[in-house]
Image (cartoon, rainbow, N blue to C red):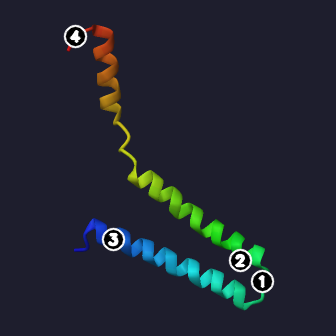
Amino acid sequence: MVSTAARTWLLGSGWLATLVVIVASSVAMGARLSTSAFLLVVCAVPMGVMLLIGLSAPSPTVAEILYSVNNKQDGRR
């Protein structure tokens, strides 16, 4: 079975390879530099957002939120 780290590297490298192919094909077709830069940004931003979300702390569960609210209202620990 593939570990989580290896799966992440595989997904990232696949994304990067796809990005390189898209930009290289746009340059090969004679697209303007601004079009190639736009394609680069459009393809790279979702990966950056996924990295920011994936590296952040996990969000609290509903049970954790309700437990913290109940403790503050009751004054008990």
Q: Distance between the residues labelled 1 and 4?
A: 66 Å
Q: Which badge, 2 or 1, is on the more N-terminal residue?
A: 1
Toward the front, the furthest residue is 33
Q: Return the disc, 4 or 3, that comes first in the chain's sequence.
A: 3
Q: Name the residue under label 4.
A: 76
Q: Which amino acid does label 3 sit on?
A: Arg
Q: Nearer the viewer, mark 4 or mark 2?
A: 2
**Residue drawn at the location 35% of the way across and 44% of the way down:** 58
Is residue 20 depicted above or below 64 in this figure? below
Of the residues tagged 3 and 1, which is closer to the observer?
1
Estimate the spatial distance between the alpha carbons at disc 3 and disc 1, rounded to whole Å: 34 Å
Residue type of the residue flagged with mark 4 = Arg
| Foreground tag (3 vs 2) | 2
- Spatial CA distance of label 4 from label 3 is 44 Å
Give the residue at mark 3.
7
Q: At 38% across and 40% down in the image, what residue appears?
A: 59
Q: Which mark is residue 36?
A: 2
Image quadrant occupied by the C terminus: top left
- Cβ atoms under marks 1 and 4 closer than 8 Å: no
Q: Helix, strand, or loop for circle 2? A: helix
The quarter of the displayed image where residue 33 is located: bottom right
Point out residue 46 in the picture as x, y percentages from the top left corner: 56, 61
**Which callout, 4 or 2, points at the residue further toward the start of the chain?**
2
Residue carrying label 1: 31
* Nearest to N terminus: mark 3 or mark 2: 3
